[in-house]
Image (cartoon, rainbow, N blue to C red):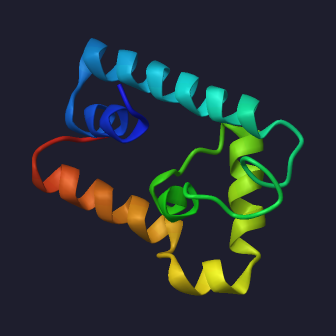
Amino acid sequence: MQVYEIGRVVWTTKGEEQEAAKKEFLECIGLLEGELGDKPYFWGETLGFLVPFYSLFYVGRAAKFYAWAKRCMQKESVSKSLADQKAIYDLFLQRMKAKGIDQ
């Protein structure tokens, strides 16, 4: 299952299914962190295709992934073109609450 699909399951389910999806999501982030290693960006010295997805990840528990995201946001071209991460997170919470799914 891909990261965005797992994220959808986390946001739209409850109970055991949600907990399993959360665990799988963090495992995927761990794989991404392993690929990142000590490099400044994924797959080299330049920004990659994951940057647009930064706003969708409000993950403080994945230190390397979060540090990578912060490095990307230091580039003016990125910070000006992506939505605020916290605002996106709040919007998801509002939409889930409207659907009767409390997180």
The image quadrant where one finds the N terminus is top left
Compared with 47, 41 (above or below) is: above
Q: Position of residue 24 (x, y in %)?
A: 46, 20
**Which of 83/75 is in front?**
75
**Which of 29/88 is in front?**
29
> Farthest right residue?
38
Q: Position of residue 30 (x, y in %)?
A: 65, 27
Identity of the residue drawn at 76% across and 75% down: 74
Compared with 92, 83 (above or below) is: below
Which of the 4 quarters of the picture holds residue 33? top right
**Which of 23/46 is in front?**
46
Q: Position of residue 23 (x, y in %)?
A: 48, 19
Compared with 84, 56 (above or below) is: above
The image quadrant where one finds the C terminus is top left
Q: Position of residue 96 (x, y in %)?
A: 20, 50
Q: From the viewer's perspective, tell me whether residue 95 is left or right of residue 99.
A: right
Q: From the viewer's perspective, tell me whether residue 34 is left or right of residue 102.
A: right
Identity of the residue drawn at 69% across and 44% down: 65
Q: From the viewer's perspective, tell me whether residue 8 is left or right of residue 45.
A: left
**Which of 22/71 is in front?**
71
> Farthest left residue?
99
Which of the 4 quarters of the picture holds residue 13? top left
